[in-house]
Image (cartoon, rainbow, N blue to C red):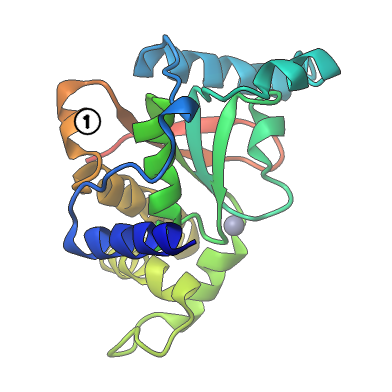
Amino acid sequence: MRTMRWALASAAALWILGLPQLSIVSAAEKSAPAMSPNEALKQLMAGNRRFQTDQTTHPVLHSQKRGELVGGQSPFAVILSCSDSRVPPELIFDQGLGGLFVVRVAGNTVTRAGLESIDYAVSQLGTPLIMVLGHEGCGAVKGAVAQCGGESTAKLPEIFANICPAVNRARKAGGSRLESTAIDLNVDEQVKILEHSALFKKRVADGSLKVVGARYQLESGKVELLDGD
Ligand SMILES: [Zn+2]
């Protein structure tokens, strides 16, 4: 217990310093998927095409797969997505057990615990791809558009405060579709945070990890990749 408390405290301190942290997970859980970032992206988008066209397979939801996964996991993609009930990653990418490592928070922003969770997938499970997934009609972004703009974000709920940089960029960009622009820029902001994180930038630079942004359309079910700057 004491060791675990120390490990968690140590991990938190290192996060604040922006330093790579030592593993707090046993080596037995390590299992690297034999897949490149581009192959992982291809597999993810193929699953979304099946979902869009009512051809979902859910191939691995049976007891045999549960048994196979008891010994460990090697998810091929991390999805940072909104908590919105209309955007469940495993369903919209037609994936079963063990496929995706999912972090969900309203507004799909990088929180401290979320970053630590993603780091676990990347550094311990060898996951080669992170997708930040925003979506049309996001209530968290809508709330942030209404709340952001004051002098300080210190008194705002974290969900809105984390989206404010994107809302500010959207206001500067102008145009009539402020909320829609903020949704995409919020994804862009989170992608940049992850790419420049001390935890991931080395892997991004050497090509072993890719971070992509995307937007989900509610009616068509389509996930569209967003281009970075
Ligand atoms: Zn949302």
Residue 105 visible in this rendered orientation of the protein: yes
- Residue drawn 16% across and 23% down? 206
Front residue of 196/187: it is: 196
Q: Which residue lies under the disc numbered 1?
A: 204
Judged from this view, the residue extending furthest toward the right is: 63
Q: Is residue 64 above or below residue 133?
A: above
Quadrant in which residue 126 is drawn: top left
Q: Quadrant of the C terminus?
A: top left
Q: Report the side of 129 relative to 179 (left or right).
A: left
Q: Quadrant of residue 139?
A: bottom right
Q: Is 203 or 177 nearer to us in this picture? A: 203
Q: Is residue 213 above or below residue 180?
A: above
Which amino acid does the dot numbered 1 rest on? Val
Residue located farthest toward the front when viewing the structure as drawn: 2
x, y percentage for residue 210? 31, 28
Residue 9 quadrant: bottom left
Q: Quadrant of ligand 1?
A: bottom right
Report how many numbered discs are placed on residues in the image: 1
Q: Position of residue 36 (x, y in %)?
A: 36, 13
Q: Position of residue 44 (x, y in %)?
A: 54, 21
